[in-house]
């Protein structure tokens, strides 16, 4: 009797498994096995599919059995181009496949070894590979704002030429790319050198000695980060190509109707995209200073859902009506600005508290406020404590009382400016030179911020005046921005260097890294947490694309 019960139990289990397998198979539009001669079935391979004539690319990741599966809900019938990302490998043979209507297509993919890793290395992998201490290499993180490190480390410049390159690059605005360089005007900040003086000479000699384009360069092994595994493979990634190939989507945010808005770091536009269709509209932002570099940085919602933009070297902020797309521009008073004036941040989030919108002049690190009732700016002056200590902020999030936080990208402190008294308080981070960059205030009033120099995430609790830090496990993650959800139980960030976005469980300290399908220069991160699972949105700042990351667990 017991033997029969065991047999019946096994039979039921097999039937259930078969049913689940059949159901899962029925829900897939395209599935298959990814393998190579070297490894057999391969976990952690990113498989991307783009329909012929479409601007949308969908990516999934192979599981521990080497299998991939595209959900039918994300793949309509048609002809698709297939591509992969797996460091050290390339796709052999099959490159396109027809997906039929109402049934599942199967395509097993075979990968082969590449001859050279050089075209595949991320910026972080270049930094891992280079000989020398991290301090010696850290200046190179300043280069990735405009281009990849491959461009630097495959050049044939000698030390003297590299010093000339440093000077030339220092004269371009941050919204420049190799195809669209935007020179700065002469002035107090007309040059932005990554290194100067003796440090520039040492950096130039170092680069000349390690650049693969130089025949006399020293030899060093190229190091790679491991492929995704476990939870890092449970993700669906969607990329939306923007119609303007020169678009630089710096900040990406999503409104209450699901429309995706972005700032263009190198042109006078704010973009809005419908993620259901990928249709994009460019909203022109008036030029205030024709002689200055173009483009905007910070983009935020006000309490009414309208969009505000910091206009960088145009020395102004702008408001875009969410429904009519009408644009209102608020230039800084002429007597306050020089050739180097720069509005990088705008903070309208809690402007309903006192009718004030915070912004900044990055040239001299001044905080400005726009009075919405009068349309006039106030200048509270430098952010100094009563004792005279000044904090020079980059990130400027506001709390629920419209007090202004100050994130010191050039140092290791955070500050807060009281909206009523304008008094400034400064707190040092536990880690030295943590370089707080950008962040947000959560529902409980706690400030979460990226520690770009500390390779971590920080949280300041104003109830205790205490700062807590979490380190990211992947070297050179250098997070740019963070956002907390679920009352701070989960925090998301992204990297300009690793091509990864990271998901932190603050209770356990566990971090899940999701690799993106291609080189992705990530700045602002935005999480839509209104659904069953969080959805992360970022801009591919050098790839003219918007990226959506959906975890499957």
Image: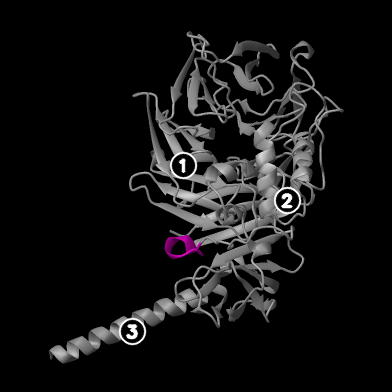
Q: Secondary structure at mark 2?
A: loop
Give how far across and how far down residue 314 sits, in percent: 78, 26
Is the C-beta separation of discs 2 and 1 under 8 Å?
no
- In this rendering, the count of numbered labels is 3
Q: Would residue 545 be seen by someone viewing this image from the given angle? A: no
Question: What span is colored magenta in the figure?
Answer: 226-233
Q: Position of residue 337 (x, y in %)?
A: 76, 16
Q: CA distance from mark 2 to mark 3?
A: 48 Å
Q: Nearer the viewer, mark 2 or mark 1?
A: 1
Point out which mark residue 456 bears: 1
- Look at the numbered disc 3 and give the secondary structure of its residue: helix
Q: Estimate the spatial distance between the alpha carbons at disc 1 and disc 3, rounded to whole Å.
A: 46 Å
Residue 340 percent coordinates (x, y): 76, 23
Q: Nearer the viewer, residue 515 or 281?
A: 515
Q: Which residue is mark 3?
A: 14
Q: Identify the image quadrant of the C terminus.
A: bottom left
């Amino acid at each position: 009797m017991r033997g029969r019960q065991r047999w019946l139990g096994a039979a039921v289990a097999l039937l259930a498994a078969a049913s689940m397998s059949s159901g899962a198979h029925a829900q897939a539009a395209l599935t298959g096995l990814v393998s190579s001669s070297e490894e057999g079935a391969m976990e952690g391979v990113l498989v991307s599919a783009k329909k012929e004539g479409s601007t949308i690319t969908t990516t999934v990741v192979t599981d521990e059995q080497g299998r991939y599966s595209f959900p039918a809900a994300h793949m309509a019938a048609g002809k698709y181009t297939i591509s992969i990302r797996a460091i050290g490998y390339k796709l052999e043979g099959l490159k396109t496949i027809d997906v039929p209507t109402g049934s599942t297509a199967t395509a097993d993919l075979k990968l082969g070894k590449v001859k050279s890793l050089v075209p595949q290395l991320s910026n972080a992998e270049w930094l891992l590979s280079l000989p020398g201490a991290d301090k010696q290499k850290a200046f190179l993180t300043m280069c990735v704002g405009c281009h990849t490190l491959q461009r630097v480390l495959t050049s044939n410049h000698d030390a003297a030429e590299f010093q000339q390159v440093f000077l030339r690059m220092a004269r371009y605005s941050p919204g420049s790319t190799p195809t669209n360089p935007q020179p700065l005007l002469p002035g107090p900040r007309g040059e932005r050198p990554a290194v100067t003086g003796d440090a520039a000479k040492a950096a130039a000699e170092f680069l000349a000695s390690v650049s693969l384009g130089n025949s006399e360069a020293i030899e060093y092994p190229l190091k790679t980060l491991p492929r995704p595994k476990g939870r890092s493979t449970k993700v669906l990634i969607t990329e939306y190509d923007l119609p303007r190939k020169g678009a630089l989507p710096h900040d990406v945010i999503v409104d209450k109707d699901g429309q995706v808005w972005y700032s263009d770091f190198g042109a006078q536009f704010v973009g809005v995209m419908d993620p259901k269709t990928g249709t994009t509209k460019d909203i022109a932002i008036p030029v205030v200073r024709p002689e200055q570099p173009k483009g905007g940085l910070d983009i935020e919602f006000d309490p009414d859902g309208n969009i505000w933009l910091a206009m960088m070297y145009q020395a102004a902020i702008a408001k875009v009506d969410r429904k009519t797309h009408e644009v209102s521009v608020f230039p800084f008073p002429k007597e306050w600005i020089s050739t180097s004036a720069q509005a990088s941040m705008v903070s309208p989030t809690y402007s309903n508290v006192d009718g004030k919108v915070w912004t900044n002049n990055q040239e001299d690190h001044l905080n400005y406020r726009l009075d919405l009732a009068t349309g006039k700016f106030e200048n509270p002056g430098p952010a100094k404590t009563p004792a005279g200590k000044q904090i020079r902020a980059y990130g400027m999030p506001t709390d629920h009382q419209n007090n202004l936080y100050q994130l010191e990208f050039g140092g290791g402190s955070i500050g807060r400016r009281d909206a009523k008294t304008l008094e400034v308080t400064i707190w040092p981070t536990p880690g030295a030179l943590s370089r707080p960059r950008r962040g947000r205030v959560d529902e409980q009033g706690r400030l979460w911020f990226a520690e770009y120099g500390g390779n971590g995430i920080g949280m300041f609790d104003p109830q205790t005046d205490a700062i807590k830090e979490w380190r990211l496990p992947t070297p050179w993650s250098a997070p740019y921005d963070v956002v907390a959800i679920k009352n701070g139980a989960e925090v998301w960030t992204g990297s300009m260097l690793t091509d990864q976005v990271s998901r932190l469980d603050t209770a356990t300290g566990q971090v899940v890294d999701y690799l993106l399908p291609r080189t992705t220069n990530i700045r602002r991160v935005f999480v839509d947490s209104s659904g069953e699972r969080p959805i992360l949105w970022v801009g591919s700042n050098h790839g003219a694309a918007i990226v959506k990351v959906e975890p499957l667990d």
